[in-house]
Amino acid sequence: MFLTNLRTTLQTHQPLIDYFTSHYGKGAKHYIGYKRAPSANDYPSICYVPVRSRLSVDSDDNRLISLVVSVHEPGVTNDVFDGFTRLQEVQDIVVAFLRDYSNNGSWVNGEITVQTDLGVRHPFYEIEIQFNLITAG
C-alpha cells in the first residue's frame, strides 16, 4: 500500500506532469516493480522498487525504496547528451517532491542518493533515486 500511495501522489505531481508533457508530449508511465522498457515508445517511465525493509514490532517501519527514472533521448546539445540533461532536470523535481513527501503516515527520512547508468545504453538513460521511506507501525 505504501508504494501505491507514493506512486499515486507522484503520478499527480503537477511539476512532473508538466515537465514530461513539455518534453515528450505525454506523462511518464509509472510501474511498481522494475521494468526495462522494450521500445522508445515506452519512455519516459518511473519504476517504484522496494529494495529492503526493516519491519519493527513496536515502532515505525523503515523501507529502502528506489525510483528508477528512464528516458529515451538520442540528441546531443552543446556536447552534452540530452539524456543526462533530462534526467538531471527530472531528478531536481523528484528530489524536491521527496523532501516534502508525507502521505498516510509515511514520510521520507534521511539521505536521498542518486546513481546514474552513465548513458551506457544510449539513447536510453536511467537514474536510480534511493531513499528511506518510514511508515507508521
Image (cartoon, helix red, strand yellow):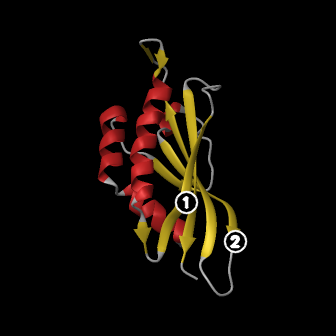
* Residue 134, above or below 97: below
Q: Counting other residues with Cα less than 10 Å from the Cα at mark 1, is it few (<14), some (14-19), or many (20 or more)?
A: few
Tag 1, which secondary structure? strand
User: Can the viewer see residue 69?
Assistant: yes
Amino acid type shown at disc 2: Arg
Tag 2, which secondary structure? strand
Q: Residue at x 44, y 28 (%)?
A: 85
- For the residue pair 57 and 119, the one nearer the viewer reads as 57
Quarter where residue 97 is shown: bottom left
Image x and y of residue 74, in percent: 49, 21
Q: How many marks?
A: 2
First in sequence: mark 1 vs mark 2: 2
Quadrant location of the C terminus in the rendered image: bottom right
Amino acid type shown at disc 1: Gly
Image x and y of residue 4, in percent: 50, 67
- For the residue pair 25 and 20, the one nearer the viewer reads as 20
Image x and y of residue 93, in percent: 39, 45
Camera-near label (1 vs 2) is 1
What residue would you read off at disc 1?
110
Left/right of residue 54 with respect to residue 105 in the rendered view: right
Q: Residue at x 58, y 47 (%)?
A: 113
Image x and y of residue 24, in percent: 37, 34
Q: What whole-number distance in Å separates the C-alpha atoms at marks 1 and 2? A: 15 Å
Residue contact at pointers 1 and 2, CB within 8 angstroms: no
Residue 57: mark: none
* Residue 116, above or below 122: below
Q: Residue at x 68, y 86 (%)?
A: 57
What residue would you read off at disc 2?
54
Residue lying furthest top in this view? Answer: 79
Quarter where residue 50 is shown: bottom right
Q: Counting other residues with Cα less than 10 Å from the Cα at mark 2, is it few (<14), some (14-19), or many (20 or more)?
A: few
User: Can the viewer see residue 67?
Assistant: no
